[in-house]
Amino acid sequence: MSVSRTFAVLAALAGTGCSSSSAAPPIHDAGAPDVTVHEGGAAGDASFTADTGTFEAGLADSPTEEDAEAGPCTRSDVPDGSCVLALAAGQSAPSGLTVDSHYVYWTLGEADGGVFRTPIGGGTVTTLASGQASPLGVAVDAQNVYWSNSGGNTVMSAPLDGGAATLVMTTPDNPLYVAVDGTSVYATTSGGSVVSAPVGGAADGGATVLAADQGQPGLLAVDDASVYFTNYTGASSVVSIPKGGVPEGGAPLVIAANENLPFAIALDATHVYWTAIGSGSVRVAPKTGVPDGGQPTVLASGQDTPAGVAVDSTNVYFTSEISAGGVFVVALAGGGPPVPFVPGQSYANVVVVDATNVYWTDFSSNGSVMQVAK
């Protein structure tokens, strides 16, 4: 993926929502690192694709013993992390990605897109919602999956145990990315707002505006007290706001100013981590903000289009989409260059982690949802 094409994709995400790429991805160089790929679904079937049927009401399909054994290759078997599972192949530019204790969830951001899941470790791909208007961001809690219809000005949800999609909120303009806590759903919009609604939706279907006039807010994350997000354009900053919204006459807390196209964001208990596409870096700052006259800490520099970022108790994981693309890892404390976690992964985009695995999307016209053990 060229730099110009990557920025075009990001611009599309920030405007009218993601659309699948019609161009075939370039073939990897013959000298690219060998990567062993195990199909997490129909073993040995390279054409394994999502089931596009209707999700039937009833109990959620639980992972089976066969699902758990679908991909025996783990990081303990192959310490360099190159042994990966293709949980779902043949996906047209998978966009949002999230995980809970049993399943991996993603969206296909087409004009007639959908929301899907598959068991961790591989298995049947289930359609949770179809016929959606360019679904982009996705989030999950114990009862529902939530997503932004970036082509329809709506944030929707569907119950995990089966049922029809329902409206959570109508947004002032195109919703981009979503996050959820125990009580509310939060979204950023292409018009520069951060909005929220109760998980069950407001009575009038509307959204509460928590902050407006932002410089193209992008990905977001929440903790107990605040909403954190990147301003991809305009002020190009990383900021936070109280969950109740910016007080009248107040302003968001600027955690880091004068950033160069900050995009993805992740949190731990004390710090905020983000990718800065313009400067090719992965950066971190305290949640309270960079001290006056200071700068964020640079964990990785010289990266080609660092896209997604995720964090656990010891490491930061990020993706690089072009050139020597892949999933990379660097220690929370820094102190050394990033290490290729899974090399040879051009188009690697969104990345999430849980206690045992790393997951990411191959954001291409013949994309996939991938997993590797830590």
Image: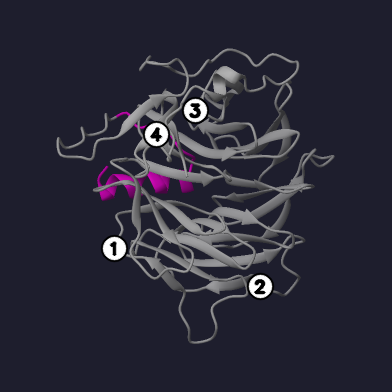
Mark 1 nearby-residue class (10 Å; few <14, some 14–19, many ≥20): few
Which of the two marks, 1 or 2, is nearer to us in this view?
Answer: 1
> Residue 302, labelled with which disc?
1
The residue under label 2 is which amino acid type?
A: Ala
Structural crowding at the residue carrying mark 3, measured as other residues with C-alpha within 10 Å and reported as few (<14), some (14–19) or many (≥20): some
**Count of numbered marks:** 4
Most distant residue in the right direction: 203
Question: Residue 11, percent across and down?
Answer: 41, 48
Which residue lies under the disc numbered 2? Answer: 251
Tell me the amino acid under the disc marked 3. Answer: Ala
Amino acid bearing label 1: Gly
Q: CA distance from mark 3 to mark 2?
A: 35 Å
- Kindly indicate the quadrant of the structure image that contains residue 304: bottom left
- Describe the element under mark 4 as helix, strand or loop: strand
- At label 4, which amino acid type do we have? Val
Report the front residue among 319 and 70: 70
Which residue is labeled 3 in the image? 111
